[in-house]
Image (tube, rainbow, N blue to C red):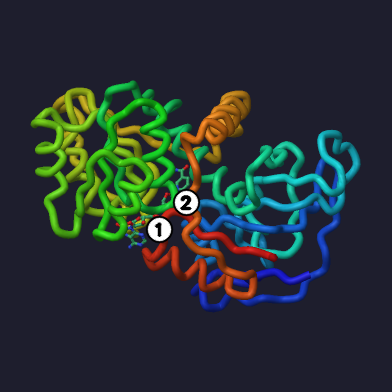
């Protein structure tokens, strides 16, 4: 079977498509024939050795997939060969066949296609955990989403709206902001051409934002934090801009602001029941039409490297997927 392989940390261009032996399921594991695999920013960081998780070599990147069960290991009770599933894999997704854990695999909901299943879990679970479990977002609150046209950004807009918030989407270009409006943002800010802090204050009538969802980092973080309301919250999601901001703590003292870290992957281990409840909530919202991952581009497995390069270079709108048609 073919797989995109990383043999050493380094530039994305070093990744190669190789023939590899088919994986064999151990106890509690499944082998899934990948149909579609979601591409996420951590894939780009991981192959370069810049992510907190450093898998042993050789490995395939790819943290979430949808596909068809090809084989099941001993002890697997919820799945049979031929079932349509979606799964969180951490690694191994950009391959024709992929090993998954039963505990991290779900039936593909009725009516959901493989691309949607592959694009849903990582970003939407992150945003629901951030906004509900960490941020406790309330209906009527104002949520500012940075990097809002990216993977987690689009999911934060849709979930913010589903939770009853008023959403201000901030991104770097007009075509990205058009995507944000398309998925439900109430207001938009182009932070390449407008002052982020001033515009948030303007759009909130001087009150400031109740919550800022920040997957970008760099200079935008402090600008957005300075435009939060009394007891406003900054949700620290990631640092796609490459720079981890150093924030003067007097900004937390002033207005009793809260700076809150979000680490969804770890949270699923600390609170597995909460994670399951969030998955059920996402499925219900999908059925009700309140959320729908925006898959903007599909790359055949042979071009998986290009997909990772695109996300590393700030070129993705919504989600892109790698497919094995
Ligand atoms: N904490 C968690 O549990 C968790 C879970 C999942 C992901 N994350 C993190 O969330 C971040 C975003 O992930 P994603 O999959 O949504 O990525 P994405 O689709 O590429 O979105 C990231 C956005 O960041 C902005 N950006 C600004 N400067 C950038 C730069 N130099 N390079 C690339 N993007 C830049 C871009 O928007 P503009 O062009 O509009 O600025 C881009 O759309 C990553 O840091 C990831 O590690 C965290």
**Figure quadrant of residue 197:** top left
- The answer to whether the residue bearing label 1 lies less than 8 angstroms from the nearest atom of ligand 1 is yes
Q: Dot 2: what SS?
A: loop
Q: Position of residue 45 (x, y in %)?
A: 48, 61
The residue depicted at 28 percent of the width and 31 percent of the height is: 166
Report the disc number at residue 294.
Answer: 2
Gap in angstroms between the C-alphas marked 2 and 1: 8 Å
For label 1, the residue is 317
Left or right of 279 in this view: 52: left
Q: Position of residue 101 (x, y in %)?
A: 74, 43
The residue depicted at 61 percent of the width and 47 percent of the height is: 117
Q: Residue furthest right?
A: 74
Ligand 1 shows up in the quarter that is bottom left
Q: Residues within 10 Å of mark 1 (few under 14, many from 20)?
A: many
The residue depicted at 26 percent of the width and 48 percent of the height is: 170
- Closer to the camera in the image, 288 or 36: 288
Q: Dot 1: what SS?
A: loop
Locate the C terminus by quadrant.
bottom right
Locate the N terminus by quadrant.
bottom right
- The answer to whether the residue bearing label 2 lies less than 8 angstroms from the nearest atom of ligand 1 is no
**Figure quadrant of residue 70:** bottom right
Up the image or down, 91 lies above or below 312; here it is above
Look at the numbered discs 2 and 1 and tell me whether their residues touch, using CB distance below 8 Å: yes
- Which comes before the other along the chain, label 2 or label 1? 2
Up the image or down, 22 lies above or below 262; here it is below
Left or right of 245 in this view: 275: right
Up the image or down, 71 lies above or below 163; here it is below
Q: Residues within 10 Å of mark 2 (few under 14, many from 20)?
A: many
């Amino acid at each position: 079977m073919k797989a995109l392989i990383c043999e050493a940390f380094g530039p994305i261009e070093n990744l190669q498509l190789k023939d590899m032996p088919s994986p064999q399921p151990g106890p509690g594991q499944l082998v899934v024939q990948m149909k579609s695999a979601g591409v996420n920013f951590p894939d780009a960081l991981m192959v370069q050795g810049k992510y907190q998780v450093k898998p042993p070599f050789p490995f395939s990147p790819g943290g979430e997939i949808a596909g068809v069960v090809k084989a099941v290991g001993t002890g697997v009770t919820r799945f049979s060969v031929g079932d349509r599933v979606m799964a969180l894999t951490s690694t191994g997704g950009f391959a024709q066949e992929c090993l998954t854990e039963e505990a991290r695999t779900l039936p593909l909901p009725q009516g959901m296609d493989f691309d949607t299943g592959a694009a849903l879990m990582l970003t939407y679970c992150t945003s629901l955990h951030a906004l509900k479990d960490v941020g406790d977002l309330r209906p009527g609150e104002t949520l500012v989403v940075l990097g809002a046209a990216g993977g987690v950004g689009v999911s934060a807009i849709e979930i913010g709206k589903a939770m009853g918030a008023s959403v201000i989407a901030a991104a770097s270009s007009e075509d990205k902001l058009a995507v944000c409006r398309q998925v439900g943002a109430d207001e938009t800010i182009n932070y390449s051409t407008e002052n982020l802090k001033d515009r948030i204050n303007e759009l909130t009538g001087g009150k400031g934002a109740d919550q800022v969802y920040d997957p970008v980092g760099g200079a935008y973080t402090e600008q957005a934090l300075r435009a939060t309301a009394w007891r406003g919250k900054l949700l620290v999601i990631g640092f796609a801009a490459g720079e981890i901001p150093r924030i003067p703590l007097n900004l937390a003292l002033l207005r009793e602001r809260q700076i809150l870290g979000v680490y969804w992957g770890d949270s699923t281990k600390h609170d597995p029941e909460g994670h399951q409840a969030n998955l059920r909530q996402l499925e219900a919202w999908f059925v009700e039409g309140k959320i729908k991952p925006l898959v903007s581009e599909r790359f055949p497995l042979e071009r998986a490297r290009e997909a990772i390069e695109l996300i590393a270079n700030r070129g993705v709108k919504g989600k892109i997927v790698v497919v094995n048609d």
